Amino acid sequence: MADIGPLAGLTTLQTLDLSATRVADVVALSSLTALLTMDLSGTQVADVAALARLTSLQRLNLSAAQVANCAALAGLPALQSLDLSGTQVDDIAALADLTALRSLDLSGTQVADITALAGLTALRSLDLSGTQVADITALARLTALQSLDLSGTEVADIAALAGLTALQSLDLSGTQVADIAPLSELIGIQKLDLTGTRVPVSQATKLISPFVSRDLERESRRWPEVWTRKPSILGVYRRILRFGVDKTVARFLGHSASAVFDARDPCVRRRDGEGFGGAAQSDALELGAPRHRPARVGARVQGY
């Protein structure tokens, strides 16, 4: 379907899904002012100026569309969810006034400057993966954020995240991050991905130790997730009592940080002097590809 002219008279329509169609011209939709949800993902739409009149729109999906300019979206104050992933958008200044936004996906776009996001304090979920972003200072005020994906970006400094105490999921995989000290107070994190970063095992151990050293019955719901071959939390607890926190974390996060911790494990290759992303670190490990993925315990800290 390419011609959506007949839809122009459906003025009470609230939900419209045109995803993966051949639609390129959305002028006919400008009269559908009652729309709350619209999906134009995977279409040929490049010009979204006609959407400026849809001031009641709450959810808009433009993923993988031909959009390069999102200026027209500035007039959609009711937007709560916006997906621009996989588009050619590189300037998001128009989003600065969309203060109702709770979910924003900019993954795979050409965006580098995210200053416009500084005032979007209602954001709960933000995906910047695969963008050109390097400076995340603008995120410091987004204290409602629960999920943040920075994977595959140029980010190296995460100091701006120190005050985001609502964060539950954080993906830093494939970034230039080497220091995760700013995360030390984010005790609500349930999922943390450090795959391909330059973070040393010793720092990860220091970050996670306070969690595993508390009474597991009381704290099990807040545990940062660890990969382990023993699915029993009680088994982890017993190991803590026997070997102490540091060695236990090294065993379950480091997958054998040295000969002391199962050095014969074929899933681990020791590379003295290298970090997880190849940077110089004295206590880093490199994980091989296991034949079977280990069982999970609690939440997950990936990358180790």
Image (cartoon, helix red, strand yellow):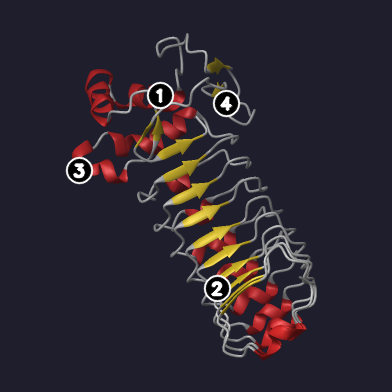
Quarter of the rendering containing residue 8: bottom right
Mark nearer the N terminus (2 vs 3) = 2
Q: Which residue is mark 2?
A: 119
Q: Is residue 63 above or below residue 119?
A: above
The kind of residue on which mark 4 rests is: Gln
Q: Secondary structure at mark 3?
A: helix
List the residue tagged with mark 1.
250
The image shows residue 200, relative to residue 44, as above or below, that is above
Mark 4 highlights which residue?
Answer: 281
Q: Residues within 10 Å of mark 3 (few under 14, many from 20)?
A: few
Q: Earlier in the sequence, mark 1 or mark 3?
A: 3
Q: Say what amino acid the circle numbered 3 marks.
A: Arg
Left or right position of 73 against 122:
right
**C-beta proximity under 8 Å, tags 2 and 3:** no
Q: Residue 86 in the image: state x and y as whole percent.
A: 71, 57
Where does residue 192 sit, x and y in percent of width and height?
A: 47, 43
* Nearer-N-terminus badge (4/2): 2
Mark-to-mark CA distance, 2 and 1: 40 Å
- Decide: few, some or many residues near mark 4? Use Cα within 10 Å; few <14, some 14-19, many ≥20: many
Task: Name the disc covering residue 218, or none.
Answer: 3
Of the image marks 4 and 3, the number of the one nearer the N terminus: 3
Does dot 2 land on a helix, a strand or a loop?
Answer: helix
Q: Residue at x 52, y 73 (%)?
A: 80
Q: CA distance from mark 4 to mark 2?
A: 37 Å
Q: Amino acid at mark 2?
A: Gly
Sequence-earlier tag: 2 or 1: 2
Alpha carbon separation for disc pair 4 and 3: 35 Å
Select label 4 or label 2 by which is in front: 2
Q: Nearer the viewer, mark 4 or mark 3?
A: 3
